[in-house]
Image: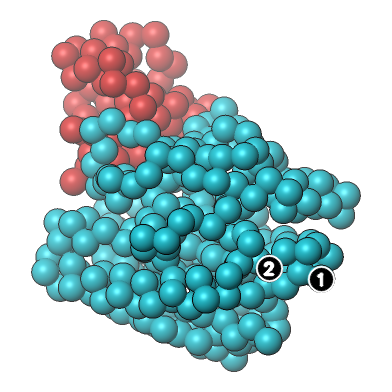
Amino acid sequence: MGRIVYAAAMSHVLHPPYYEKNVGPHGKRMVEELIAVVGEMGRELAARRPDALVVVADDHLNVFSFDAVPAMCVRIGRSVSRMAQPGAVEFDRALDGLAERYPLHEDLANRILEDGLDAGFDFAASWSAPLDHAFLSPLSVLHGDRPMTPLVPFWVNCFVAPLPSARRCFAAGQHIARVVASGPWDVGVIATGGLSHFPELSLTRVGESDPEFDRRVLGWMERADHASLTALTTKELHATGSHELLNWMVLLGAVAPSRARVRFFGEMGRIDLAAVEWAIP
Amino acid sequence: MSRYDVNVLLYRLKKDGAFRERFRRDPAAALRAAELTDEERDAFVRWNPRRLNELGGSLHLVLSIPDLGAH
C-alpha cells in the first residue's frame, strides 16, 4: 500500500536577485533565509526516499495561453521540459541556469488522471506543457545536487477567472491521497505559491500584501481547521492576493487531517513568504 | 471579447520575439489586424501597462514581457 511520506508547501520565487531588484536588501536577505529553510526541507524529503513527487502549482499565463485554461491539469508522459523564455525578465529569471528536462512518474500521473475522471474530476491532461518557476524554482532548491525525483506536475488555475473553488481543490487533494493509498508508491506532495501578493491582480497594488490574512490562514493550517480554509471564497483570495492558496488547498486535502508546522514566515511588504510542513503519521 | 484579445496580444508579445520587435518598431502597424477597441489600441500603442491591466490584461503578462515589462 502506498503512502504520502512527505508534504510541504512554500513560496515559489526562490530567486534573490528578483527581490533585491524589487524590494531591496531586506527582500534579498529574507528570501535567502527562506531558501536555507527549503534546502533543509529538501534533505528531509530525500530521507523519506519518495518514488514520486506530486507538485501542485499554477501557470503564470506561460503554458496554457488563452486558447484553453484548464481548472486543473495533470501532466502525463515520460518527461517534462523547463519553460523557454528568451530574454526573460522578472520572476521568469528564476529559471535561469536550471536543467532543461525532468523525469515524470508516468504511472502515478496516469492513475491520478484516469481514476480522477472515473471519480467525477474532469481533469485536463497535457503531454507537452512545460514547467515555469512555480514548479522549478522550489524543486531545484529542494533537490540541491541530488537527482530530481520523478514528478507528477498538477496545475491549478489560480489566475484566469473563473477559478476553481477552494473546496473543489481540497477534494482533488483527497482524490490524490486515495490514489496514493491504493497504489504501491511512496509519494511526496509539494504545493507552491504565495502567500499574499498582487491583490486583485492589479498593477497599481503590486507591492502590497496582507500579513493579517496570512497569519490567520497559517493558524488554521496549524490547527488543521480545514472547514475555515475550504470556506474561503475566490473573491476573498482575489481581494487579498492569495490566489495561489488554491494550490495549497489541494495539498491540504491530500494530507487531511494532519496539522501544519510553519517552518518559515516572513513579511516582506511586496509578498509574505512561507515554508510549511505537515506532520505525516 | 476584448479582454481576450488584449491578453492574446500580451501573450504574443511575451512569447514571439519577432512580433515583439515589429511592435517595438511600429506598434500601430503591428496591431493593425487585431480586434481591439480604440481604448485598448491606444493603451498598446502608447505602451501603458497600467491601463492595459485595468482593461483586463493579465498582471503576470504585463510584468514579464521582455524589454517591455511594467517595472
Q: Which residue is mark 1?
A: A1
Chain hosting mark 2 = A
Q: Nearer the viewer, residue A147 or A20?
A: A147
Q: Chain of mark 1?
A: A
- Residue ranking furthest to the left: A25
Q: Is residue A58 left or right of residue A36?
A: right
Quadrant containing the C terminus of chain A is bottom right
Query: x, y percentage for residue A118?
Result: 88, 49
Q: How is the image coloured?
A: by chain
Q: Colour of chain A?
A: cyan
| The quadrant where residue A69 appears | top right
Label 2 Cα neighbours within 10 Å, binned few <14 / some 14-19 / many ≥20? some
**Could you tell me which quadrant the N terminus of chain A lies in?**
bottom right
| Three-letter amino acid code of the residue under disc 1 | Met
Task: Say what amino acid the circle numbered 2 marks.
Answer: Asp
At 84% from the left edge and 65% from the top edge, which residue is drawn?
A: A182
Q: Nearer the viewer, residue B55 or A97?
A: A97
Give the residue at mark 2: A186
User: At 19% across and 69% down in the image, what residue appears?
Assistant: A27
At mark 1, the secondary structure is loop
Query: Could you tell me if residue A237 is visible in this image?
Result: no
Circle 1 crowding by C-alpha within 10 Å: few under 14, some 14–19, many from 20: few
Q: Is residue A15 visible?
A: yes
Q: Which mark is residue A206?
A: none
Place of residue A33 in the rendered image (x, y in percent of width and height, measured from the top left): 26, 76
Secondary structure found at label 2: strand
Percent position of residue A269, x then y: 25, 71
Marker count (numbered): 2
The colour of chain B is red
Relative height, residue A129 to residue A140 (above, below) = above
> For this rendering, which residue is in front, A71 or A176?
A176
Residue A52, quarter of picture:
bottom right
